[in-house]
Structures are given as structure tokens and as C-alpha cells.
Image (cartoon, rainbow, N blue to C red):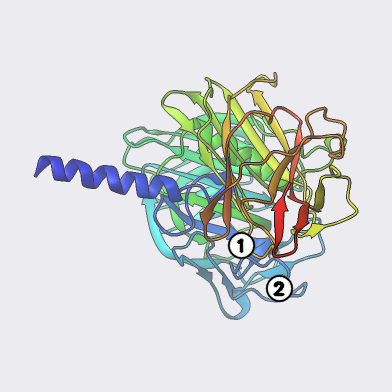
Amino acid sequence: MKKHYYLLLTSLFFYTYILGQTGPGGVGARNGSSSLIVWLRANDLNADGNITNNPTNGSSVSTWADFSGNSNNFTQSGTRRPTYNSLGTFDAVNFNSSVTTAQFMNGTVSNVYRNASVFIATNPVNTGNSHSLLDNPSASLRVEQWSNTNRVGLTRYGISDYRTNIPSPFNTNSIISYHKRRNSSSVEVRVNNATQNLNIGSSTAGIPLGRIGRNSNGADEASGDFFEIIFFRRRVNNAQKIIIDNYLSAKYGSIAIPVNVYDEDDASSGDYDHDVAGIGRTNSSNLHNDSQGTGIVRVLNPTNLGNNEFLMWGHDNGDLQMNTGLNAPSILRSRLSRTWRVSETNTSGASVDVGNIDMRFDLTGITGVSAGNLRLIVDTDNDGNFNDETPISGAINLGSNVYGFNGVSSISNNRRFTLGLALTKIITNRRITHRVNN
């Protein structure tokens, strides 16, 4: 029985692991199998994967649907509903703490987690009161701690208010995150590029999940725009924390973060801000080496991923379709309009080599693709053009419209990559016509 039990655990771990790359930045899974239990994205309010069907500006928000695969939706009715704000740089759910009736949303799950991580991308507004982020009957995360302190903190109701020295980031696009280990009485609080360990007095206390904002008028209400909320019921490791920070920073305007290992989102690099994901390692206990995120590219199996090394990628939001007339090698008949760019650096910003990697592409909806004609194109001289490059063949059809390239060695820091389809030669004799890929 012990042997069978071990095999069962191994199989369950492997199943979760291979599916565990579609969460934010490629951390966690969107099928309910991982510790990712809530993922709210204002640019996809109904969590259908389509960011073009959001409400009109000023609409009352009754449901903010969960993208994690757990259906942990947040809901509200009547005058307590927040509104949808599409007039800013980024779509948001706006909570107006200056109105008479408190605006908040109730989640499907209400609990306090002793071992957890939560990331909140927000732009809070100061109306002179204390302001909550997440709240339940036991505890509250505060973008501004009690009594107008202008400091981020955490409250345990009936016990104490715990205040960091980090200023409340009012009127600034910000990433606020809380991380707690089981059996620790400290919570790591991160606000943009500031970090502080906050002692909350008990190892059994934790990070609350229940409401966005508090159900009380005049104080402790939610404030301003909320862009994204990500909750893991187990603390993410240090490498995953860095990856998620970089995903959120790239998505919401290059927000300052403690460790920036992705700079392709900068305007000078071409604004490769979309579907950012990555792999990385801070040490052997803090590792993430299989990632896809919200995009079609998955990277796994690096052969030389060292301590404090990361490989991250994002794209320019080009169309997912093959087109002719784009800059491409002459032996290709078409190229994907979308281009990706890579940062392959350590935590100090120096270029590194994580070794060969396996790459997977989900090409669902793209016609004319086969393992025989698909080519990977890497801008190896980093001049922004693909027409002087040698396309890489050897694609493998992995099923369900997923194609892979194994042992790719040409990806390195700052390089771009895309896909193309090879020309076909027509060879004719008197009896038969053959089509052969170059």
C-alpha cells in the first residue's frame, strides 16, 4: 500500500504541475487544481477570456467573475454596487468611498488563510477615511490603516491595528501584496518597490478573504480603481513572487517593483506589455521552470537555470494570424503578425543564459499550420528584422493545436521571436503531383 500511495501522490503532483502554468505570469492553474483560488481581472469582468465585451463606462457592477476556474465570484446588488471605469488608461472596477452608501462586493469564499499570498493592482483615492482592500469578519487588509495614518497595514478586529511604515500609494497605479508563511507571526507587505515584514502578533492569524472593501459607512471602505486581484491559498515562492510582480508591472504601466527582471515593457524596448509570463529561480527551494500565463507561448525545461536567474517574455499585441508581406525570410510564405520579446537576466539586471528551453505554441484558430511547415524565427542579431534570419524547423505536433520546439538555444536577452509557415514546392510528373515543404 505504501508504494501505491507514493505513486498516487507522485501522479497527482505531476498532473497539477503540468497544468500549473496558466495563472498570472504563468503561476498557478486556471482549472481549480492549484492554490490559485481567486483571480479577478477588470479588463475581463465576466472572466470569459474576451476583453472586448466589458460593460460601458459608469455601469453598475453586479458580478466580478473569477478567472481562476473556481467560480469564486464577487457580487453585489442595489446602491452598494461599484461602477465600471473604462475612461482611465486601464479598465477598472471603481469603489467610490465618498458616497453615502458604502460600496463593497461579497465573495463566494470567506476565510482567513495562515499560509497565503494576495496581489492587488489598484489606484486608491484618499477621501480622509481609512480604506480597506480585502475584508472579512476577522481581519482586513488596509491601503490606509485606521485613523487617517496614511500608512498601509492589516487589522485584526477586536485585537489590534498593525501599521507598516509604507505610505499609502494614493492616486498612483500600484501593486500591493501580502505574503504569510504558516507558523509565522509576520506578514511580508509589498507596496510597489517598498517591502516590510509586519508582525501581526500571532502565527494563527492570516490574510483575510471575503469582501472587497468593508460593509460599513464612513470608514474602512474600498477606495478608487481596482484593476486586478489575485489570491493564492498557499504562499507563492520567492521566484513566483518576482514573476507575478513583473507580470502586473508590465500590464499596468511599468509600476516600480522590488525586483524588475522584465524590461521589454519599456517604450524604448517596444512596449511588449501583453501576456507577460516567465520562469525563474532564486535558489533550489524557490523555483518556477514551467510557465505559460494568459498567452499562447509556454516555456519549460531550461537546462541551465541558476540562482537568481529569470527568463520572461511578452508580446506586442499583434494579430494572431499569418500574413504575407511582413519582414520575413524569403523561404517563408507567411509570418505571424504577433511578435514576442525576451528578458533573460539575473536579479541584478545582467544578461544570463538559462540554457536550452522547450517552447510550446497553442495555435488554435490559426489555419494552414502543420508540424512540417511551421517555423520558429528568432531575431538573433537583434536588429528588429526577421528577413535576415534562418527559420528553425523541427516542430512537433503535440495535439489539440499545440506545437512544440524542443531544445531551443537561440533565445537570449532582448531578442524577439515569432512564427512563420514555409513555402511549399510543387513537383509534378506525368502521374502524380507532390507538395513538399522547404
Where residue 231 appears, x then y in whole percent? 49, 51
Along the line of sight, which residue is nearer the eye, 223 or 65? 65
Does residue 48 appear anywhere in the picture? yes
Q: Residue furthest front?
A: 430
Q: Circle 2 sits on which residue?
A: 53
- Mark 2 crowd level (few <14, some 14–19, many ≥20, 10 Å Cα): few
Residue at 66% across, 62% down = 42
- Amino acid under disc 2: Asn
Q: Circle 1 sits on which residue?
A: 218
Quadrant placement of the N terminus: top left
Q: Residue furthest left?
A: 1
Answer with mark 1 or mark 2, whichever residue precedes in sequence: 2
Residue at 70% across, 53% down = 436
Does residue 150 appear anywhere in the picture? no
- Secondary element type, mark 2: loop
Where residue 10 appears, x then y in whole percent? 27, 42
Where residue 77 appears, x then y in whole percent? 56, 79
- Amino acid under disc 1: Gly
Q: Is residue 197 left or right of residue 171?
A: left
Q: Is residue 160 above or below residue 306?
A: below
Give the foreground label among 1 and 2. 2
Along the line of sight, which residue is nearer the eye, 361 or 423? 423
Along the line of sight, which residue is nearer the eye, 89 or 32? 32
Residue at 37% across, 33% down = 185
Indicate which disc residue 60 carries: none
Where residue 194 appears, x then y in whole percent? 64, 30
